[in-house]
Image: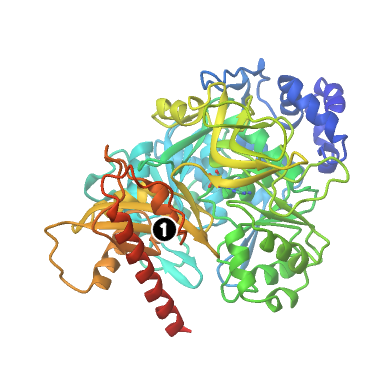
Amino acid sequence: MFRRSLTLAGRGLAASRSRTLSSLSFLSEDHAKVYDHSTNDPERFWGDLARERIDWHQPFNTAMNCDMNAGKIRWFEGGKLNVCENVVDRHARLDPNRIAFIWEKDEPGDVERVSYGDLLESACRIGNALRARGIQRGDRVAIYMPVSPLAAASMLACARIGAVHSVVFAGFSAEALRNRIRDAEAKAVITADEGVRGGKRIPLKSIVDAALDDGACPTVGDVFVMTRTGSDVKMMHPRDVKLEEAMSEQPPTCPAESMDSEDLLYLLYTSGSTGRPKGIAHTQAGYLLYTGVTHQNAFDVRSGDIFACVADIGWITGHSHALYGPLFNGVTSVLFESVPTYPNPGRYWEMVQRLRVTQIYTAPTALRLLIKSGDSHVRKYDRSSLRILGCVGEPLNVEAWHWYHTVVGERRCTVVDTWWQTETGGIMLSPRPAPTGTQPKPGFPMLPFPGIRPLLVDSNGAEIVGNDVSGLLCIRGAWPGMARTIYGDHERFLNTYFRPYPGLYFTGDGAYRDVDGHYRITGRVDDVINVKGHRLGTAEVESALDEHPDVAEAAVVGFPHEVYGEGIYAYVILKDTFAPAGTMDDIVKSMKGIVKSKIGSFAVPEIVLVTPGLPKTRSGKIMRRILRKVAANQTDDLGDVSTLADPAVVEEIKSRHVELMKEREYAYGRKE
Ligand code: WTA
């Protein structure tokens, strides 16, 4: 790659455009050489790729200007480009009829195809509609929509006019949405009348109304409402406007803003170890290049592929692999509106057969759920179109790996377990590309992508060298896709990622490096948990529970869950003034209800244990280690509890836990 890049660099874009995708891949190259070059001379490596792969309005001066000690990350400074042009116009120009999206709606077989030409027109019309209502370069626009071509076109419209999109997963509650709108000071919201998932309707417009209620978000002047179900929704004039009507009033072309490489492209809120979600900020050129190149190489993307990333566009996986990655590479992306078990657990594979999907990208939790339903749901469909089986979000356990490989992939497809984060922008560790002959290893994302230098450190920050070792996973050196800041809180950005181990990016994950130098992720080392493939801060759940009128204090931990990866376990102390207004079941139900309304139903604790106290040190710090062990049923192995202010509370918690587990077993037994 690098030899060719060097020769191509001066020849301009005409040469690069005529290349086929596969000739731009790392997979046919000598991997060791590519990797060595990428890490020895990242500036050259990424600079050549940026010249080769991106259409620039104005070339950049400096490829790389990064100081990891200071958390200052700048790529391709001086360059000007437009991301929408790079992912849509360039393909529409060559072949406007090429299919950009296949929208697989909630009902199987209810499909719409959107060409690159159509997508360009939609993005332009929305861009014009936004501009007509005063949205300008740099303004933030919140998007709270179902997975759909118009949601994607809305994101691209923002990119086209230089506005910053902030997509909020359409499963978040009104309050969570409000907090994100306020933090981003969004000027407009784009939503839909309703969402539809797994046969159920979600009243998105009413949720937006509740979020904006009582002037809670004074920056929002406009709400655009896409019609998904056509149900009657309340429209408030002049704030609200139907998206399709606003589009029809606008011309089908829209001049693209010339953006600086380091201007913001989007914000995406994610959970950290404190209560307040972080607006992770990504910029234009670096994100585009890194996402496009990793998407192509991790999944061996070739012209004509039909790539199905089934993640919601409200998460980073949807941003990078349903939208920006596949479109940068000019392939067809399946936008999946439904859930893996609707109307039955054969949904993915029936869709694979019908749409001739070449790569599928899902989460371990979905696989584990499908494993439980038996192999017949898979085997009855033709999966011969599949080449790559991708996975992300949490550790892919060995059993699920084998099932994916043998049952789904008939031992023919490569399983690509990718490790990355909202903050990294694109895939960091993955079995592909790999040196020739390297076989994927169950449970291991395995290898760094070119340009990525992972390392393990101990809690003092000393590097752990050699193999067959475990430690905290850090990254040395910058890469173009990394986040640039936390919106409005650069200090928090530095404190979270750069200051813990100076000179390094700290991931928050632990990892094991085996005898072959391959990485396996052991899980988060902070108070973040991965539940059903969703990332959640335990502190967020705690602060929701704290708002319940009967709760004095709450402590939330994750526990190993055979389907969800991790489950949510809440320990709750009730107020002294608490006077029961119902059974304990009712109270627990109302606590769960408050989490649902403050965050969303995916954050509701599976287990709530009411306790008279929590294990605290004499200085008042909750010893979460003990709570995690109890939740994991490891009550014989609690370690030293002598430093606790009140060691007796541990016995009480243990016995209540055992009782609760018995009740649950009984309840489940009864259900079956
Ligand atoms: C976890 C998702 C094990 C990890 C793209 C990380 C994984 C967090 C894997 C980021 C994997 C992601 N194996 N764990 N292959 N992929 N994770 O920001 O804990 O939603 O830090 O990004 O998911 O979650 P996020």
Disc 1 crowd, CA 10 A, few/some/many (<14, 14-19, 20+)? many
- Dot 1: element: helix
Image location of residue 309, percent across then percent down: 64, 55
In the displayed structure, does residue 563 sit left or right of residue 383?
left
Q: Who is closer to the viewer here, 80 or 394?
A: 394
Q: For residue 340, what is the image quadrant? A: bottom right
Query: Number of numbered discs present?
Result: 1
In the displayed structure, does residue 329 sit left or right of residue 477?
right
Look at the numbered disc 1 and say if its residue's Cβ is closer than 8 Å to ligand 1.
no
Residue at image position (66%, 76%) is 374
Q: Amino acid at mark 1?
A: Val
530 vs 47: above or below:
below
Residue at image position (72%, 32%) is 466
Image location of residue 496, percent across then percent down: 46, 31
Q: Who is closer to the viewer here, 152 or 518?
A: 518
Question: Quadrant where the N terminus lies?
Answer: top right
663 vs 458: above or below:
below
In the displayed structure, does residue 326 sit left or right of residue 582?
right
In the displayed structure, does residue 310 sit left or right of residue 215?
right
Using the rendered image of the protein, determine whether residue 396 is visible from the camera's viewpoint: yes
Taking the view exactly as shown, the residue that stands out farthest to the top is 61
Image location of residue 334, percent across then percent down: 65, 58
Residue at image position (71%, 27%) is 50
Q: Who is closer to the viewer here, 118 or 425?
A: 425
Image location of residue 458, percent across then percent down: 56, 32
Residue at image position (39%, 29%) is 489
**How is this picture coloured?**
rainbow
Residue pointed to by mark 1: 630
Using the rendered image of the protein, determine whether residue 121 is visible from the camera's viewpoint: no
Q: Who is closer to the viewer here, 410 or 137?
A: 410
